[in-house]
Amino acid sequence: MVTNISLQEKTVLYLNGVSKSFDGFKAINNLNMMIKPGELRAIIGPNGAGKTTMMDIITGKTRPDSGDVYFNNEVDLTRHSEAEIANMGIGRKFQKPTVVETLSVFENLELALKGKRRVWDSLFFTLSAQGRARIDDVFEIIGLGPRRSILAGALAHGEKQRLEIGMLLVQSPELLLIDEPAAGMTDEETAHLAELLKSIAGTHSVVVVEHDMEFVRSLNATVTVLHEGSVLAEGPLDKVQKNERVIEVYLGR
Amino acid sequence: MATTDTVSGTALSGPIVVKLFEEKSTRWFLLAIALLVCVMPVLNLLVPADSAFHVSNYTITLLGKYLSYALLALAVDLIWGYCGILSLGHGAFFALGGYAMGMYLMRQVGDRGVYGDPLLPDFMVFLNWQELPWFWYGFDQFWFAALMVMLVPGVLAFVFGWLAFRSRVTGVYLSIITQALTYALMLAFFRNEMGFGGNNGLTDFKDLLGFDLQSNLTRCALFVITGLILALAYIFCKWLTLSKFGRVLVAVRDAESRTRFMGYRVEHYKLFVFVASAVIAGIAGALYVPQVGIINPGEFSPINSIEIIVWVAIGGRGTLYGAVIGAFLVNYGKTYFTGAFPDLWLFLLGGLFVVTTLYLPKGVKGLLVDGKLAKYFSRSGSVSKTSTEGV
C-alpha cells in the first residue's frame, strides 16, 4: 500500500508514512499525501478517519509518532511550534468557528493581518494604510463590512465562519487548511464560499476537509478519501465515488 | 472607519498618547487621584487639628496603604483581567518588593538600633551573627534597593513564568502552582537562617533617605508619591491594554489556540505581561512597607494573595479602574469591620465574594457603568460605549 512519493517535484505539503496513536488507537496510520502549489484539495472521510488529527500534525499542535511532514520540500514541520508554522505561511480554520468574541470584527482581522508578531512589534503597532486597505478588501470578500464595529461574539454562526475565513485571508498564508467551512452556512453562503475557495486556489494552496458532498462537488477538486488514518482513494470526485471500497466504508451507507 | 473608532472603545484613531486620554474613565481616574493627593495632605498639614476638616495622620497612613494595595490590584487585573492568568501568588511579588525596601530601611537604622551595632541589624546581633550576609550588601544605597525592588520580583516572575508558560501550564494548574510559590516563600522567610528576620520580619525603621518616617511631612510625602506612582502605573497599564499588545492579550484570554495559529508566540506575551505585573506588585510592596512600618513573612501567606483576587473581582476585572475601586472598597470594609465586628469580617469577605461571583460578574464597575444603576449616574450614550470593553 505504501506509495513512495519522490521529492523530485515541487510540493507545498508532503506527508510520508505519518503515524500517530492515542492510547493505542491509531488515529493516523501510515498516511501519505502530497499537495502541489496552487492546488485545491478536498478531504473527505467518515468520523474518526483522522482528518482533524492530520490538521493538528501539519499545524504543529500534535507531534506524529513517525513519518515526515515537509512544507515547500524543505521545512520539517514536526520540528516547529504552532506559531512558527503559522508564520511560515500555513493558516488554519477550525471546525468550530473560532474568533476572539470579545474583540470587534475589525480588531479580529487586524490581529490576523500578516505582519510581525513579536511582543515588541505589537506594543508599538500602528495600522499602515496598506494594512487597512487589505482589511477593507477582505471585508469586500467576506461581506461583513457593515458589521465591522460590533463584537465578534455577537455574530451569527455563519458570519463567524466568514470572519474566520477572512482572518485566514488577511494572514495571506501559502497554504490554507480549512476544516468543515460549510457547517452552519446557508446554501447561498456555501455557494459563495465555494467560489471564494476556487478563486484563492491557484495563488494559494487550499486543503478543505468537508462532509457536505454537494459542497465538495462544487469545488471541482481532487478528492482524498481518508479511512482509519490512511488514504483509501484519491482522484476526481466522480471516480472516487465509483470506487467500491469507498462505497463500502463511506458513501454507500 | 469613523464608526469603528467610536463604538469599539479601543479606538483606532490617532497616536496612542491621544487615545490614552480619549477614554472618559482614564480622565476621571486621574482626576480622582490628583484630587486625593492634593487635598488630603493640605487637610492634614495646614488645617488645624481641632477643625472638622482636619485629616488625621492615621487616615493619611491608612489611605497611603490603600493606594499601595490599589497598585497591587492593578498589577493583578493586568494579568487576570486582560490575559486570563489567575495568579494566586501575587502577594509574593508584593512581599519581595517590600522586603527589598525593608532591607534598605534596616540598613538606614545604622548604629541607632537597640544593640547599637553600626553594621548589623538588631535581629542579626540577637542571633549572634558576626558579619553581614552577602545578600545584604548594597542595600545601604537607595538606588540599589530601588533596583532590587523591581529586579527581584521581575526575575522571579521571569523564571517562574518561563517554565510555566513554555510548558503550557494554564488555568487551575497555574493558579495552584502560584499559590505553592508564595507558600514556599512564606515558609522560607519564616526561618531565621534565611537572614530576613524570620518570624518578626523587618521593623523599627527610622528614616528613608534621611527623612524621619514618623514625621507628618514624610508620611504625607509617601502618600503623595504612592498616589503619583499609582497614576503612572495606571497610564502604563492603559497604554499596554490599548495597544495591539493588549488585544493580543485579550485574544490569548478568550481563544488561546486561535492566537497561536495566527502566529503569535503566546508564551512570550504571557511572560512579558506577567513580569510587568510582578514588577508593579514589587513597587507596591516597596511603597507599602515604609508607610506600615513592618514587613514580615505573613505577607507571603496564600490568604493575602487570594484577597487580592477578591478585590479585583469585586471591583470588576478587565477595566483597571475597577481593580482600584475594589481595593479601596474591600480594604475600607476590612478596616471598619475588623474594628467594629472583628469576628464577622472573614465571613463577610467570603459572602461578598460569593455574591459578586453570582450576581455581579463584572463587579462594582459592572453595577455602576453597565447596569441599571448606570442610568441614574450617566447621561445617554456613555453606557453602550463602555459596555463593549473586555469582560
Image: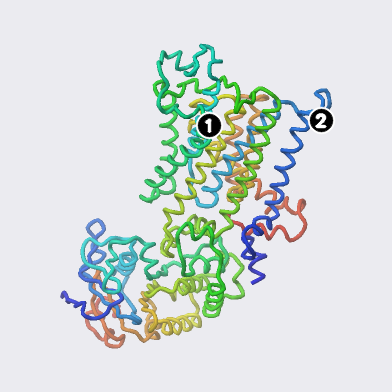
Report the mark closest to the observer, 1 or 2. 1
What residue sits 52% from the left and 47% below the top? B80
- Say which of B257 and A130 sits in front: A130
Q: Which quadrant holds the C terminus of chain A?
A: bottom left
Residue A73 found in image quarter = bottom left
The answer to whether residue B336 is visible is: no
What residue sits 42% from the left and 58% below the top? B265
Q: CA distance from mark 1 to mark 2?
A: 33 Å
In the depicted structure, whether residue A147 falls above or below residue B96 = below
Residue A201 percent location from the top left of the image:
39, 82
- Say which of B352 and B312 sits in front: B312
Q: Which quadrant holds the N terminus of chain A?
A: bottom left
What residue sits 63% from the left and 68% below the top? B4
In screen coordinates, is A39 left or right of B248? left
The answer to whether residue B66 is visible is: yes
The residue identified by callout 1 is B98
The coloring applied to the image is rainbow
The residue identified by callout 2 is B53
Question: Mark 1 near mark 2, Cβ–Cβ under 8 Å?
Answer: no
Q: Which mark is residue B246?
A: none
What residue sits 84% from the left and 26% below the top? B51
Mark 2 belongs to chain: B
Residue A18 percent location from the top left of the image:
23, 67
Residue B78 percent location from the top left of the image:
55, 48
In screen coordinates, is B330 left or right of A16? right
- Say which of A23 and B249 sits in front: B249
In the depicted structure, whether residue B135 falls above or below residue B26 = above
- Say which of B370 and B102 sits in front: B102
Earlier residue among tags 1 and 2 = 2
Q: Amino acid at mark 1?
A: Gly
Residue A106 percent location from the top left of the image:
57, 69
